[in-house]
Every structure is written in structure tokens, then in C-alpha cells.
Image (cartoon, rainbow, N blue to C red):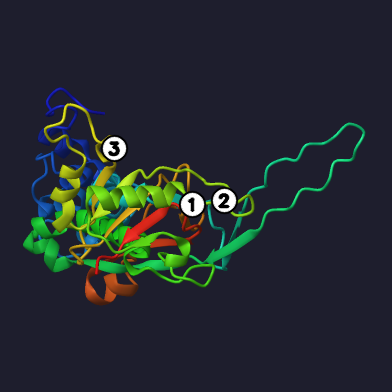
Amino acid sequence: MYNSESHGNRLSARHIKNNGSASVILDAFFDPGNRAVRSFREAYYMITGDKHVTGRLNDVEPITYREAIGSQTLGSVLGDSINRAMLRDYHNKSQYSIWRKVASVGQPITDFRTQQRFRVGGYGDLPIVAENTLYNPLTSPSADMSSYAVTKRGGTETISLEAISNDDVGVIQRIPKKMAQAAERTLAKFVLNFLKDNPVIYDGDTLFNISHNNLGTAPLSAASMAVARTALVNQTEPGSGDPIGEEPATLLVPGELEEVAFNLFQRDTNNDKTFVERMALEIIRVWDWTDPDDWVVAASPDVMPCIEVGFLDGQEDPELFLQDAPNTGSMFSNDELVYKIRHIYGGTVTDFRGLYKSAVI
């Protein structure tokens, strides 16, 4: 598919213009590293043959449009390219992917009904069974239940005939990137707001609560970090009452505390690391935390899941849909292609024992 005239593995301008594939032309336009197609108006003309951007595709040379599009419409091909570009940006690592450091993805959700999640405690120590005696029943562990339902998030965007005619390259090229960014940011806020807003959870108390032994008020320091670690490792398993002993893995801070957090785990003048320096937590700056003093430590969700996120039908990526019928809807009434982005998910706190927050007074 790619030739030696391209930069790296990208198609050359000459190959693209002679190729006649609408998807290749539009993918090149939305690829920031490919300069073979720099004008959206040019891409539109290459695909449709509509040189003057009239929108009347029945007036163009039939063979041009048929070879470029095949059995699809211009809008659907454009939507496919925007969708590919959007998902490419969505899967790039960014500050918004940090939610995966504190939450786990649950099983695919099959409908919009409320989902129930049961968390079962542990058994106490196994008693000794004497010779020729019966095995006594164990005390069954307690179970807590949390629940949530998935909800839809999304919106629409349009590409007008005027935008194509005016060749608004920057605007059109930014659509997939900005859509991906909005979807990522919304999901990240949804998860991280559990830590910021301290909601009431399944047991009727707030997530961070003195009764949960996971709430402090001290500013970030070596001493307060040691207190947070102790609180986490001393959390006990429901039922057995034994300490869970799970170490913190990440430290989440606002931008104002990022330098303090970094320096906390660096050696000073000692040759040997201090106890806190040995912890070396992963520092995560949460871009929208406005309180300059509050901070949170969390255990790894892989070993101690505390927040669950569920996606409808397991669809973790946002979806893009198109309304482009040429003789009905917005294309007919307003000369516009209308795209809809949709992302469906939900989540909840399933356990408090792997999280600790210092809400500095």
C-alpha cells in the first residue's frame, strides 16, 4: 500500500492523487505527519469531482465519484477517517489516561439497568480439627454491595458546505483531536472526581472518613506520608479482621504540590535512602484539582481495586456516528454533515481500603 516516495511509511502526494481512494485521501489529510494532502477543498475535489463545491454531486462526472467512493457516501468515508484519527489520538498516552492508575475496568455492561457489585470479606484463621472430631462450619464472611448504571455522554459536530468551500483546514483537522481530547478528559474527570469530591459510598459514609481510617489533615511531608502508608497497610479485611497490608503505589497531587512530591522521594545528603524515599511512589499530577494542599495515595487497582468503571458492551472507545443522507436531514436542509460522538460508561467506589486522602485544613 505504501511506496518509496513517501516519508517513512506515508504515501506521496502523487501516489495519493492518482490512487483514487477516498479513505486514503482523507486519512492523509487528517494525519499530522503527512503533508501530501494539505487542503480539505482539494481532498473534496479529488474525491467528488465537485470542483466549485456546489454540493450537487449528481452534476459531476459519475466515474470520478464512483471510483473514489465505491459503495459508500462522502460523509461516511469522511466519518471513517475522522473516527480513525480520533481513536489514534484517544489511544495516545496523555494526562487524561491517569485514571487507569486508580480504577479498574469491570466486566462489559449489557444494558442500562443498575449493576450490583458484591464485595465479599475473608474467613478467619482455620481452626484445628482434632482426631476423630467433626469439622465445624466456618463463619461466612460478610458482603457489601455497591451499585451503578452506565450513562450516555456525547454531542454533535457539523461540517458545512461553507467550511469545505472556504478550506478551513485547521478547523477541520482539529475536529478528531478535540473530540478525542474531550472524551478522554470527561472520562478522567468522572473517575478522579471520586477522589476529589469525597462522595457517600455503599456503607452510607463518605469515601474518605475518620471511621474508614483513611482521612487525614496534614500537609504533604515525609511524616504525613508515613502516616498515610501506615493507615493503608493497617486496613483490615472484612470478616477475618486481619490487616490487608497493601502498600500505596501512587501519589496524586495538584500542580502546586508536584515539586514537593517529587523532592519527597529524592535522596538528600544521605548515602542511604530514608524510609519514605524507599517508597518511591509514582507521582501523578491531576490537572484540574484546584485545592493546592490536598493529596491522595492509592494502592494499585490491579491488586486492590477500589473504583470500578464499566462500559456498555465493553466498548471502551468513544464511537462516532454520521447523518449524511443527501436528500433528507441536515445534508438536505442545511448543507451540513452532522457527526455524533457517543461514550457510554458508569462506575462507582467498590472499596475504600486502598485509598487515603489528606484534606489539609
Q: Earlier in the sequence, mark 1 or mark 3?
A: 1
CB within 8 Å, label 1 to label 3: no
Above or below, 145 against 317 in this view is: below
* The N terminus: image quadrant: top left
Q: Residue 89 carries which label?
A: none
Q: Nearer the viewer, residue 128 or 66?
A: 128
| Amino acid type of the residue that numbered disc 2 sits on in the rendered structure | Glu
- Residue 62 placement (x, y as % from top left): 26, 52
* Label 2: how many Cα within 10 Å (few below 14, some 14–19, many 20+): some
Name the residue: 17% across, 32% down.
10
CB within 8 Å, label 1 to label 2: no
In the image, taking residue 200 as reference, residue 78 lies left or right, namely left
Q: Within the image, what quadrant is residue 181 found in?
A: bottom left
| Amino acid type of the residue that numbered disc 3 sits on in the rendered structure | Phe
Residue tagged by mark 3?
275
Q: Which of marks 3 and 2 is nearer the N terminus?
A: 2
Q: Which of 56 and 203 is in front in this view?
A: 203
Q: Nearer the viewer, residue 277 or 269?
A: 269
- Residue 215 placement (x, y as % from top left): 37, 62
Q: Residue furthest bottom?
A: 333
* Label 3: how many Cα within 10 Å (few below 14, some 14–19, many 20+): few
Q: Which of 128 and 201 is in front in this view?
A: 128
Q: Residue furthest right?
A: 132
The secondary element bearing badge 3 is classed as helix
Residue tagged by mark 2?
237
Residue 45 visible in the shown view: yes
The secondary element bearing badge 2 is classed as loop
Closer mark to the observer between disc 3 and disc 2: 3
How far is mark 1 from mark 3, CA to CA? Answer: 20 Å
Residue 103 visible in the shown view: no
Q: Residue 235 carries which label?
A: 1
